[in-house]
Image (cartoon, rainbow, N blue to C red):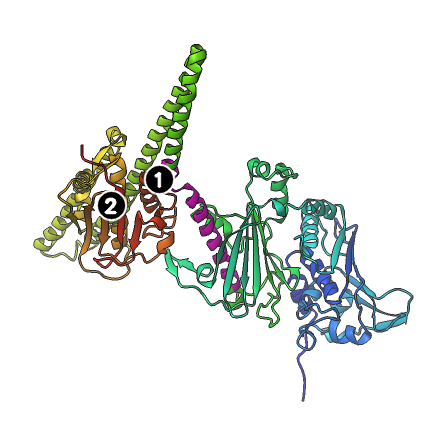
């Protein structure tokens, strides 16, 4: 006996009604079929559809289907027609797959009427009726005979599909979802021209369309444009609000990433060629005022609420659910929460990843909810993520270039302005002494205000340094305390095994000794913040960096000894004086040494002796400070970007502010715009001790 596979009607339920979780996805599948048919227009109409039993009509002006097309294509489920003809008559790359989405869409209702007029058969139309109730009384799907009727017509080519007796209604939320999906399907960017328009005849669609059509793309603060070529190599450009290219990166720059805080080599992406664009906005009125925008700032947030996020366009059509509310597939919000410096979120940006994918590297999921997470898709997503990271680093670099040395430059400008004001005051006194007194009082008030701001700035810098050192110490203390807890638990669990009293006593003494050392370390460190925050240390004075170094060594000696870190001092004999608050010099030492301590504690490779060396030297004009260590070097950050907030340091869970504080102090003392290029502050990845070495140059103050 010979036989063959057969399918029970229940398979239609599995592949149809249970395949697509939301009815709007089924409608979109039918619209995508119209796109594959080279339609210019596709209209969707819902009648009495707020409750079950309504009617759905999808009409297009595409190429239509012949009777053979209906039999071998429309009704053939599970085989793709793309391999033989991947392009349409108009040159569109087909987006339809194996008909499963279409089947799910047809199962939205209880009866189907298909009327199609093929372009190749003018004056002819084919009609097909499907009543799903016919399948309820048969054993197999193939037991139901379907008939295609052919008749004459005067209508233009196209297809009309009517679904009667909708199984579920479209409530307000479903209609809102469908309206948004329809409006966004063919793109909402001003340069997207697909030659295809899909409309929904419903008030919700008009509401969404009105919101989308406002268009704020000219109001961006920054715009990222990144490309991925066929070889898997990336490049990117960053534009400011004036549309000026302010940064450009090649593959090495753009494709770098981090894994658990460690800087990773650039990837050669195994993804199809793609373009990623991201428009980043500032949600404040000042940005609109600055560019004299005709748009209302208050309208930006509602616009972003409708289209915000990064959308994925595959062969010209948007793919659900990428960019939908709550589906942050690039994890922009997560990255922003971990490192908020100048990073966009799905609420402050809108973007698109556009991919043609001629080799079908991206595979749609059976339920049409996006693509399977194969290597091609994972690398496509990683390309967009790393391009976003690159843009954030460049924005930070641009901001910091304008900020570094700002305090010193402002001080010079203030002194210059003060001299000009005094000249004007002297002239006023000759003619109106009373008015001159009022102006002088105003100037004095402003001077006191500026001095108060300067004191606050120094205080906050000192507080930041204390906070960093305290956080590191607390982390180490918690580790030690956790070790004590483990020892105690082990002792308690093994009391019965410790037969002899000597072993028991030895274990207890070890735990007590460890606890005593931990308590002594905490007690000694508790005094450090108070010593660092003394008011006298925030007054500008002639400071000998050698004296400041010795006091630093005294304050942190216990902390370093407890961690088996040897601090070596190689201080010059001659005076090494600079004009600055003591707090600034202490901050330099503290942040650099804490950075070295972090490098030791987070090193993945075993090392020998842990040494930190502080060396000072002078010449006729300068004071030199070198801080070197025997750690692993700068392994998780590029040397040229380690001074940026959030980038420096040796810990993936740290703030990355310590090196930024050092940079700002050096810049303020010099008044230079770019301390790195001018050589006042630099670093070697591997110095004389094998780890990182920081070189600092400060202007020498003559001995009085």
**Residue 274 left/right relative to 153:** left
Q: Earlier in the sequence, mark 1 or mark 2?
A: 2
Residue 435 in sight from this viewpoint: yes
Residue at numbered disc 2: 477
Which residue extends farthest left? 502
> Magenta part of the protein: which range?
380-408
Residue 54 in sight from this viewpoint: no
Tell me if residue 394 is in the magenta stretch. yes
Circles 1, 2 touching at the beta carbon (< 8 Å): no
Say which quadrant the C terminus sits in: top left
Residue 226 coordinates in the image, percent (x, y)? 54, 59
Res 90 → quadrant: bottom right
* Label 2 secondary element: helix
Which residue shows up at 70% across the image and 54% down it? 182
Res 502 → quadrant: bottom left
Q: CA distance from mark 1 to mark 2?
A: 39 Å
Mark toward the viewer: 1 or 2 = 1
| Front residue of 519 and 587 | 587
Q: Is residue 82 above or below residue 414?
A: below
Tell me if residue 48 is in the magenta stretch. no
| Front residue of 46 and 578 | 578
Q: Which mark is residue 671?
A: 1
Which residue shows up at 74% across the image and 60% down it? 196
Res 377 → quadrant: bottom right
Residue 611 coordinates in the image, percent (x, y)? 19, 53
| Majority secondary structure of magenta residues | helix
Q: Is residue 72 above or below residue 543?
A: below
**Residue 31 left/right relative to 491:** right
| Front residue of 304 and 277 | 277
Residue 285 coordinates in the image, percent (x, y)? 57, 36
**Residue 576 left/right relative to 389:** left
């Amino acid at each position: 006996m010979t036989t063959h596979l057969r399918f029970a009607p229940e398979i239609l339920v599995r592949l149809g009604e249970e395949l697509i979780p939301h009815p709007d996805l089924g409608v979109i599948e039918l619209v995508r079929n119209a796109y594959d048919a080279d339609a210019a227009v596709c209209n969707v109409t819902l009648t009495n559809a707020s409750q079950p039993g309504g009617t759905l009509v999808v009409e297009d002006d595409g190429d239509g289907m012949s009777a053979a097309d209906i039999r071998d294509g429309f009704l053939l489920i599970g085989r793709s027609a793309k391999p033989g003809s991947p392009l349409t008559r108009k040159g569109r790359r087909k987006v339809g797959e194996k008909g499963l989405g279409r089947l799910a869409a047809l199962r939205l209702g209880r009866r189907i009427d298909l009327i199609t007029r093929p372009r190749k058969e003018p004056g002819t139309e084919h009609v097909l009726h499907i009543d799903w109730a016919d399948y309820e009384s048969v054993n197999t799907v193939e037991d139901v005979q379907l008939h295609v009727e052919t008749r004459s017509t005067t209508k233009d080519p196209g297809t009309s599909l009517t679904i009667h007796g909708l199984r579920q209604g479209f409530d307000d939320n479903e209609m809102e979802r469908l309206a948004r999906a329809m409006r966004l399907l063919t793109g909402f960017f001003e340069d997207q021209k697909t030659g295809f328009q899909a409309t929904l005849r419903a008030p919700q669609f008009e509401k969404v369309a009105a919101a989308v059509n406002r268009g704020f793309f000219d109001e961006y603060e920054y715009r990222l444009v990144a490309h991925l070529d066929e070889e898997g190599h990336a490049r990117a450009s960053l534009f400011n609000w004036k549309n000026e290219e302010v940064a450009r990166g090649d593959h090495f720059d753009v494709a770098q990433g981090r894994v658990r805080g460690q800087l990773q080599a650039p990837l050669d992406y195994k993804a199809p060629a793609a373009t990623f664009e991201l428009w980043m906005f500032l949600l404040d009125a000042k940005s609109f005022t600055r560019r004299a925008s005709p748009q209302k700032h208050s309208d930006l947030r509602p616009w972003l609420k409708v289209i915000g996020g990064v959308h994925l366009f595959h062969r010209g059509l948007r793919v659900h659910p990428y960019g939908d509310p709550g589906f942050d597939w690039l994890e922009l919000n997560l990255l922003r929460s971990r490192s908020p410096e100048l990073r966009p979120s799905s609420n402050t940006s809108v973007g698109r990843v556009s991919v043609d994918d001629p080799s079908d590297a991206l595979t749609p999921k059976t339920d049409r909810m996006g693509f399977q997470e194969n290597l091609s898709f994972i690398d496509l997503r990683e390309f967009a993520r790393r391009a976003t990271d690159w843009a954030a680093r460049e924005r930070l670099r641009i901001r910091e270039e304008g900020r570094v040395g700002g305090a010193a430059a402002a001080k010079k400008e203030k002194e210059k302005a003060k001299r000009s004001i005094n000249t004007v005051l002297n002239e006023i006194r000759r003619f109106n002494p009373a008015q001159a007194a009022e102006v002088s009082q105003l100037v004095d008030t402003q001077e006191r205000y500026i001095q108060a701001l300067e004191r606050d700035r120094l205080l906050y810098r000192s507080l930041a340094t204390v906070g960093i050192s305290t956080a590191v110490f607390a982390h180490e203390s918690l580790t030690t305390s956790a070790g004590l807890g483990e020892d105690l638990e082990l002792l308690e669990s093994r009391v019965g095994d410790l037969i002899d009293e000597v072993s028991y006593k030895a274990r207890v003494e070890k735990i007590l000794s460890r606890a005593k050392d931990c308590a002594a370390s905490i007690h000694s460190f508790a005094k450090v913040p108070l010593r660092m925050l003394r008011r006298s240390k925030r007054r500008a004075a002639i400071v000998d960096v050698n004296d400041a170094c010795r006091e630093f060594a005294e304050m942190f000696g216990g902390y370093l000894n407890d961690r088996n870190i040897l601090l070596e001092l190689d201080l010059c004999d001659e005076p090494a004086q600079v004009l600055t608050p003591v707090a600034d010099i202490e901050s330099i030492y503290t942040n650099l040494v804490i950075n070295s301590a972090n490098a030791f504690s987070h090193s993945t490779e075993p090392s020998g002796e842990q040494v930190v060396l502080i060396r000072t030297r002078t010449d006729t004009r300068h004071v030199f400070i070198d801080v070197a260590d025997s750690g692993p070097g700068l392994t998780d950050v590029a040397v040229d970007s380690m001074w940026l907030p959030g980038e420096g340091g040796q810990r993936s869970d740290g703030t990355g502010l310590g090196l930024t504080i050092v940079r700002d102090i050096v810049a303020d003392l010099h008044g230079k715009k770019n301390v790195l290029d001018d050589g006042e502050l630099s670093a070697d990845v591997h110095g004389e001790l094998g780890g990182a070495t920081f070189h600092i140059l400060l202007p020498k103050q003559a001995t009085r």
